[in-house]
Image (tube, rainbow, N blue to C red):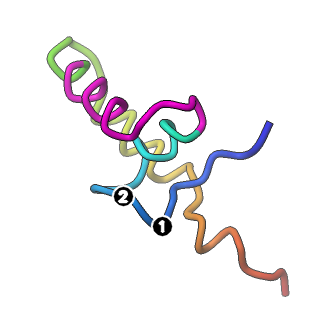
Amino acid sequence: MTAIARPTNGRMIGGVCAALARRFGVSATTMRVIFVVSCLLPGPQFLLYIALWILFPSEDKGSGTAW
């Protein structure tokens, strides 16, 4: 299993939906629609998005060399 990373291309806001779409093999648009529809339900969707934004590394940061 590969680690989830926010892509540098195809981001809308933070790249969380694009990263999840790549991981689960669906289009980024489908994942974004699922997120927007889920926001109509009660729950902490925005807080979860922000937490994933912080927790998922960006591809450009993860490809650097160690010092």
In the rendering, at what x and y percent does residue 30 appear? 33, 30
Residue sitting nearer the eye, 14 or 34: 34
At numbered mark 2, what does the secondary structure look like: helix, strand or loop?
Answer: loop
Q: Residue at x 76, y 43 (%)?
A: 2
**Residue beneath disc 2:** 11
Measuring from the top left, give residue 67's x and y in whole percent: 85, 87
Image quadrant of residue 62? bottom right
**What's the amino acid at mark 1?**
Thr
Q: Is residue 8 above or below residue 49?
A: below
Q: Residue lying furthest left in this view?
A: 40
Q: Residue at the location (48% across, 36% down)?
A: 21
Q: Is residue 53 above or below residue 43?
A: below
User: What secondary structure prevails in the magenta region?
Assistant: helix
Q: Estimate how packed mark 2 is, as few (under 14), some (14 to 19) or many (20 or more) residues with alpha carbons within 10 Å.
A: some
Instruction: Tell me whether circle 2 and circle 1 mark residues in contact (CB < 8 Å).
Output: yes
Dot 1 falls on a residue whose secondary structure is loop
The amino acid on which the numbered mark 2 sits, given as a three-letter code, is Arg
Where the N terminus falls, by quadrant?
top right
User: Which of these two is toward me, 53 or 33?
Assistant: 33
- Indicate the position of residue 17 as horizontal and vertical percent values: 40, 41
Q: Does 50 appear above or below 6?
A: above
Q: On the picture, is 26 further left or further right than 4?
A: left
Q: Residue at x 62, y 73 (%)?
A: 61
The part of the chain drawn in magenta is 23-37
Residue 64 in which image quadrant: bottom right
Identify the residue under disc 1. 8
